Image (spheres, rainbow, N blue to C red):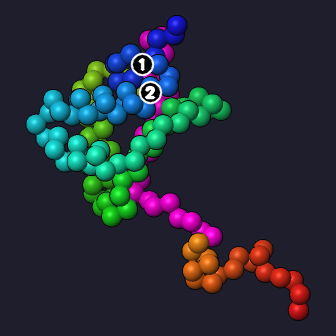
Amino acid sequence: MLEWKVLGKKTLPVGIQDTWESQLEALAKKREDSAKFLKMMGKADIAYKFDTIRELHIFQVTLPSKTSMADLEYFRDYIQTLRKSARAVMVSLEGKEQKSTVVISADEDVNEYQVRRETHEVHPMDRSHSH
């Protein structure tokens, strides 16, 4: 079986997201300044995807929409600090680093159809062509 690691911890492909989350939390708990980061992690919606075309591991972190830009930057920087403290790459396969990225946002999913209905806005393609 192939050996996958996330932040230095062995895992199976189906466990990559859970391992990433638990490793970040474990690494943060070793630091004195972790309270803010751990609180933000608790509010984060985290998803993992593998882009087969670009062979890229993507960790998508969505924080509450009211999160400030300063807090988003703090969160990004803290993850980079934790990765360095792990002395391991984000994702590896058989000891070889894999391409990976972390996407952090505070965007809300918007149901455009619902918004249009509520504002009575009609998309130009939806208009009747009768005069």
Q: Residues within 10 Å of mark 1 (few under 14, many from 20)?
A: some
Q: Is residue 65 visible?
A: yes
Q: Which mark is residue 34?
A: none
SS type, badge 1: strand
Q: In this view, which residue lies farthest toward the top?
A: 1
For the view shown, which residue lies furthest in the right direction?
A: 130
* Residue density around tag 2, few if under 14, some if 14–19, many if 20 or more, within 10 Å: many
Which element is circle 2 on? helix
Q: Quadrant of residue 107?
A: bottom left
Asked if one can make out residue 96 in the rendered structure from this viewpoint, the answer is no
In the rendered image, the vertical position of residue 1 relative to residue 6, given as above or below: above
Chain part drawn in magenta? 91-113
Q: State yes or no: residue 130 in magenta.
A: no
Taking the image as shown, residue 41 lies to the left or right of residue 118, namely left
Which label sits on residue 11? 1
107 up-or-down from 49: above or below = below
Camera-nearest residue between 122 and 51: 122
Residue visible at 27% across and 55% down? 71
Separation of marks 2 and 1 at Cα, in angstroms: 6 Å
Identity of the amino acid at label 1? Thr
Q: Residue at x 28, y 46 (%)?
A: 42
Which one is nearer the viewer's eye here, 65 or 77? 65
Residue 112 on image: x %, y % = 60, 68
- The numbered mark at residue 16 is 2
In the rendered image, which quarter contains the C terminus? Answer: bottom right
Exactly how many numbered labels are in the figure?
Answer: 2
Taking depth in this image into account, of 50 and 87 the one nearest to the observer is 50
Check contact, mark 2 vs mark 1: CB within 8 A.
yes
In the rendered image, the vertical position of residue 34 relative to residue 131, given as above or below: above
